[in-house]
Amino acid sequence: MQVGAKGLRVAHPAARAQKSSAVTAFLRLTAVLLLLLAGSHAMAAELQRFLPDTDPQVLFPEGDRIGAPEGSPPVAPVFSADQQIGFVFLTSDFVNTTGYSGKPIHQLVAIDLNGIIRKVLLVEHEEPIVLIGIPEKRIISVLDGYDGRDIGALARGNAGDHKVDVVTGATVTVMVMDDSILRSATKVARNHRLGGLTPDREQAGPKAVINPQAGDVENWAALTADRSVQKLALTLAQVNAAFEASGDPLAAQRPEQGQPDEVFIELYAAVVTIPAIGRSLLGEAEYNNMLQRLEPGQQAILLAGDGRYSFKGSGYVRGGIFDRFQLKQGDASIRFHDFQHKRLRHVAAAGAPDIKDVDLFMVPPDEGFDPAAPWKLELLVGRPTGPTQKAFLTFDLTYEPPEKYLSIVVPDQPTGTGLLSWLRLDTEDTPLWQKMWLAKLPETIVLLVALGVLTLIFFFQNWLVQRPRLTGRIRIGFMLFTLFGIGWYANAQLSVVNILAVFNALASGFDWGYFLMEPLIFILWGSLAAALLFWGRGPYCGWLCPFGALQELLNRLAKLVKIPQLVLPWGLHERLWSLKYLIFLVLFGFSLHSLTVAEHLAEVEPFKTAIILKFVRDWPFVLFAVAVLIPGLFIERFYCRYLCPLGAALAIPGRMRMFEWLKRYKMCGAPCQRCSNECMVQAIHPEGNINVNECLYCLHCQVVYSDSHLCPVLVQKRLKQERYTSASAGSKSDVTLRVEKIRKKAGQTPNSH
């Protein structure tokens, strides 16, 4: 909301005192959740941790020594005798390498001075599909395929189509590894000018860059006149007017006391890593001191302020952060800590006024701050509106470097090839998840269509269940699609590991990129979240779970060959329900201590063996999966009923469903037990009510509910109607006979008049 002059707006209207305590609490909770969701897997560079155990001859056959890591992110030079032959770096120091486990996949990459990858080593990971399942040697063989890759040619788009050697069952893991290898290697090649590549800022297309030779040392008047130094000036009257216009009556009732034209703040800003500006404002000695503190490419700004309000505040003293201002450029918001700050005595430019606060701020090098691009400083001004409440406004100081310090660079642009280039999804900075969605676009469309069909089935179930034969055929067809399409073809089997990974990510740093990397899994989770509100866990467990479909189809075959079916006594069955909840709670408890341990224990789910790896696995896992499936031949959906931790995890939020779609009669359960006896998973209590936590939404009870030859309630109604119709027809015949007798007595024939 704009208030008054340009650059002035209400920052925190939700902080108004008239808001109720409940709303305030809700907003605080929302803010906490957003912070959790916005977190990232920020971590310190870890290259040094792996170098002591790395043999240089494994990286380069001619290598004999690895030097000390340099730069940020770090790379380590590799030498043969005293001659450098290449670099080694850790992929996770450069890019996000979060895999299926939710943890980084660490790989060492050796690249020579010509930009050729010489070796890729998998040094640490927690991928469950590799730790338990796929032999690691299959992953190593994939990494061996990167030997000899020319990163320069790949980056320029003239190396042909790059194809990933995907390992079946470990698609996400391999795609993450491939993406992190190529992106990190490209960054290293650019930073060190390998393979004919140059740094990103020299390849970004026509853009402005700082000309270090432009400009001269100037006095204060000249610097402010040409806007090398830019200013935000506020008087008490302007600040008071802004709070009045904000719409907060409590803030407006507490104006700043003093003369209206008194200076509230005069704030000056400049980029002092522009050489001419820095030398003018800092002086030659301080400018050189600053350069010694800065890392290559790091930038610094000078802020100077006077008046009754200090832009520095006191937060940086208490907690190490300046809380009254932030720098914004593009999508980046930068706050400064005390260790990025140096207090100066004065402004060195000739004719500069005596300013109370003069401070130098070093912009963090990983923020990508561009000194040649415009940026904005947001100044936060607070005003008490109660004992513990404040209203806030922000005032903007916009800085744009003068053109005289800039040069325009127009580099040659590489031309990509193929569909990815046309869609602009083959760039180095394109997130992997976007590439994954494009690669799996056909499967995504098919799954969305299937979900649409399933939604129609549920919304029009009353029409469908009146056609039992059609209902049965649709269910068998969908089970086959789920098993062969979603399961064995697409490997889109949800797992309790996904749920544990979400909880772990919320605690350690949430990254949407990781959860978006597998499109079909993401879509299934999204549809499941919606289904839980409407129908509970039944739509997924009963229709979309490949392992559940495998159990149901095997049981149907068992019935065809006359394998006897067992029905457990209700008391025993009801108590066995609790096993899957106990299993889930154990897994969840272990995940709070170690997600890796929980993932190992999650092998209680045979999904990986039966669906993802299609029983091609070590014999103990295959034996366990078969042992789980065999009881299902006698007890329909045995694993779903009693052991599945995923089903238990979904049943808990499934209690929040908003609608009751499954219909019941008053006689259901008392005395009628037809549906209870025929329920596939015995989810109907003897009293007649359906336990939605256990219901798989197969719709069989609704078929019975609508069938006048199966449901005792409808059977009684049908027989009663038939008796009534028969009685009515019989009464009409008796009247006709009596009329004929009367006519005979009168000497009339039945057709006479």
Image (cartoon, rainbow, N blue to C red):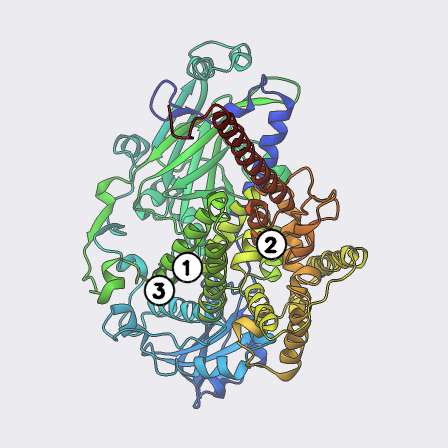
Residue at image location 79% in from the left, 56% down from the top: 575
The quarter of the picture where the C terminus appears is top left
3 or 1: mark nearer the eye: 3
* Measured Cα–Cα span from mark 2 to mark 1: 32 Å
Q: Total marks drawn?
A: 3
Indicate whether 414 appears above or below 618.
above
Q: Which residue is mark 1?
A: 433
Measured from the top left, where is residue 676 in percent x and y?
Answer: 69, 51
Q: Amino acid at mark 2?
A: Leu
Q: Nearer the viewer, residue 337 or 351?
A: 337
The local secondary structure at tag 2 comes to loop
Cβ atoms under marks 2 and 3 closer than 8 Å = no
Image point (41%, 24%), residue name? 9
Mark 3 or mark 1: whose residue is earlier in sequence: 1
The kind of secondary structure element at disc 1 is helix
Image spot of residue 481 (x, y percent): 45, 64
* Circle 1: residue type: Trp
Residue in front for this viewpoint, 425 or 446: 446
Instruction: Write down the residue under mark 3.
Output: 439
On the image, which quarter does residue 571 sit in? bottom right
Image quarter hosting the N terminus: top left
Q: Alpha-carbon distance for marks 3 and 1?
A: 10 Å
Q: Residue furthest bottom?
A: 62
Q: Which badge, 2 or 3, comes first in the chain's sequence?
A: 3
Crowding around mark 1 (Cα neighbors within 10 Å: few <14, some 14 to 19, many 20+) is many
SS of the residue under disc 3: helix
Q: Quadrant of residue 635?
A: bottom right
Q: Is residue 609 visible?
A: yes
In whole angstroms, how far apart are the C-alphas of marks 2 and 3? Answer: 33 Å
Disc nearer the start of the sequence (2/1): 1
Count residues near mark 2 (Cα–Cα under 10 Å), then give few for <14, some for 14-19, many for 20+. Answer: many
Query: Residue 696 has which mark?
Result: 2
